[in-house]
Structures are given as C-alpha cells and as structure tokens.
Amino acid sequence: MKRPLLISDCDEVLLHMVAHFADWLEDAHGIHFDIESGDFATALTRISNGEPVAPEEVWPLLDGFFRGEMHRQTLVTGALEALGRIGEVADIVILTNLGDEAHPWRVAQLAAHGIAHEVVCNQGGKGIPARAIIDRLGAGTTAFVDDLPVHHASVAKHAPDVWRLHMVAEPRLAPAVPPAPHAHARIDDWPTACDWIIERLEGK
C-alpha cells in the first residue's frame, strides 16, 4: 500500500512569522505593521509620520527578515506533537515559499525546533510542486496545509485529489483571513487539525 503524505507550509502553520516580523519592523525600521488588517500591501506605515510603506519596499523587508531574523520565529503550539503523530502514519514534506538560497536556513531553523523533515523551497503557486512531490514519492492519500488561499486554489487545480486544510495559526491575523474557498476545511489549531488530517490520511 502506498504510504500517505502530508505536505505542510511553514510560516503561520508550523512557525509564527508575522508577529515577529512586526516586532523587527518596529525595532529596526521604525515601521508599524497592522497585523489585524490582514493586508501586507497596506498594513505597513512609518511610525514617524504615518505614511504608508510603498508596496515595492515590502518584499525587500521580508527578504531582510528571512535572511537575518529567522531566529526570532517561534513554534506554533501543538505543531511538533501533531507532526509526531502524523509521522507515524505518513511521510511529511515541508513546502515553503522561499528562494533556493534559503533552503539551508529553513532546514536548520526547523531542526532547531525539533522538526526534521524534507524541506522543498518554491516560488509561486504550490500546486505544481505539490504534484511533483506526490509523484516523486509515489504517495498515497495526501493532505496539504497552508495559510494562503491562493495556494489551495493552485493545489486544487494541479492535484485535485489532495485533501486541503486551511490554517492560519497566528491569532491576531486569523480573524482577518476568510476561509479559503478551495480548501476542504479551515482549522487554526494543531490538536484539532491533527485529528482531521489523520482521519483523511487513514480514509476514515
């Protein structure tokens, strides 16, 4: 029998990111990040004058965070325990939207939190790389977890047989993010999500 598979995102699923990004923006750049708005494009303003940060400046700031501040990120409650349970019945791959140069950083970061699973870096929609992972591993029933609705739409297009779980683990952000239309369920805590995932992977 083909072994089941979990493909999981990292930021705001396994590790908290936006809250720590907000702290760094204020400390290092004098920028306020209105996390509760749920919109990166308009949520950043300069503390000194209230002026919005231009959209073209946001991505370089994110890049700076991932290049030098990933040590700030903390483990989502229950994530490690859930991966332990799921790993007893399925393979696990972390599919993260970072450039290839960040692969060793992400592997080391996750290992420091006790997470030692294959990491695949990606840019753009996750449907095609998810399909490639499934085919490469010859996986059976597969579940996919991500915080961004766009990736659920991509996986629904390219790997429609995959169970898709929408999770936003940051409590300050979650209320601002509607359930992903292309996900089968929305669960924002790992104890509940773990049961849902295992039930699907085991065909219950």
Image: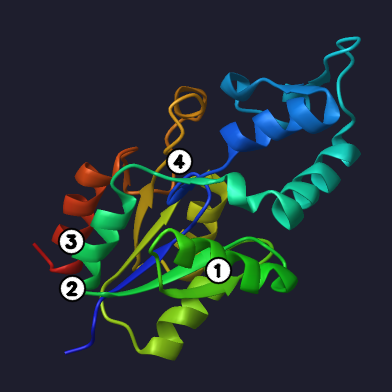
Q: Earlier in the sequence, mark 2 or mark 1?
A: 2
**The residue tagged with tag 4: helix, strand or loop?**
loop
- How far apart marks 1 and 4 lie (CA) works out to 30 Å
Q: Going from the N terminus, do you reach mark 2 or mark 4 first? A: 2
- Residue drawn at (83%, 14%), measured in percent from left and top? 47
User: Real-space Cα distance between discs 2 and 1?
Assistant: 23 Å
Foreground of the two, 140 or 77? 77
For badge 1, the amino acid type reads Ala
Q: Quadrant of residue 135?
A: bottom left
Using the numbered discs, state the Cα–Cα distance from disc 3 to disc 2 in whole angstroms: 10 Å
Using residue 193 as the reference point, say whether residue 147 is left or right of it: right
Tell me the distance, in whole angstroms, between the alpha carbons under discs 2 and 4.
Answer: 28 Å
* Labelled pair 4, 3 in contact (Cβ < 8 Å): no
Identified by mark 4, the residue type is Ala
Residue at 44 percent across and 48 percent down: it is 13
Q: Earlier in the sequence, mark 1 or mark 3?
A: 1
The residue indicated by pointer 1 is 108
Q: Residue at x 54, y 70 (%)?
A: 107
Task: Tell me the mark number nearer the camera, choosing from 1 and 4.
Answer: 1
Q: What label does residue 198 carry, if any?
A: 3
Tag 4 residue? 180
The x, y position of residue 5, in whole percent, is 31, 74
Disc 4 from disc 3: Cα separation: 21 Å
Lower position in the chain sequence, tag 1 or tag 4: 1
Determine which residue is flagged by label 2. Answer: 88
Task: Estimate how packed mark 4 is, as few (under 14), some (14 to 19) or many (20 or more) residues with alpha carbons within 10 Å.
Answer: many
